[in-house]
Image: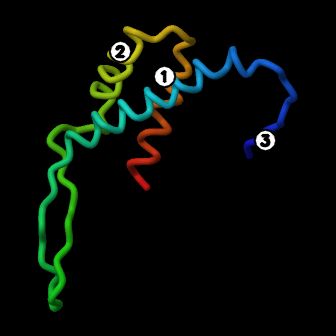
Amino acid sequence: MLRSYSLQHECREELEPLLRAYRDAVNKILGELWSHIEWKKRKTPGKKQWRLLPKYKVDIHSGKYKKKLRESLLEDWDYAAHWVDSAIKTAYSILKS
């Protein structure tokens, strides 16, 4: 179980650059992942419908690919590395949903 607590703070000016950088990192990762998807059209058996199914050009779930993605994000990253790890997890979760 994960618990979260809200804390009062007056650090808006200090936190905003981090939050913007995190958002940009998630968007960059999603763009990268989305660029590796090729869509295949298949007919649903026994129906008049078609389905679009994703086919990945590269194995985006491999550890090697994730490591390369992480290293590319860390090149221009000014904050702690765990924020990049969190952004990668968030982007993969968004793609999965």
Type of amino acid under label 2: Glu
Report the amino acid beneath label 3. Answer: Arg
Q: Is residue 9 above or below residue 29?
A: above
- Secondary element under disc 2, as helix, strand or loop, is helix
- The label on residue 71 is 2
Q: In this view, does 68 lie to the left or right of 45?
A: right
Q: How far apart are marks 2 and 1 (CA)?
A: 9 Å
Mark 3 vs mark 1: in front: 1
Please, what secondary structure does the residue beneath circle 3 have? loop
Q: List x then y, in percent, for residue 2.
A: 73, 42
Q: Is residue 62 above or below residue 20?
A: below
Q: Mark 1 points at which residue?
A: 84
Residue furthest out toward the front: 13
Q: Identity of the amino acid at label 1? A: Val
Q: What residue is shown at x 18% (from left), y 52% (from top)?
A: 55
Left or right: 14 as drawn, with respect to 74: right
Q: Quadrant of the C terminus?
A: bottom left
Residue tagged 3: 3
Q: Residues within 10 Å of mark 1 (few under 14, many from 20)?
A: many
Residue for point 15% across, 85% down: 45
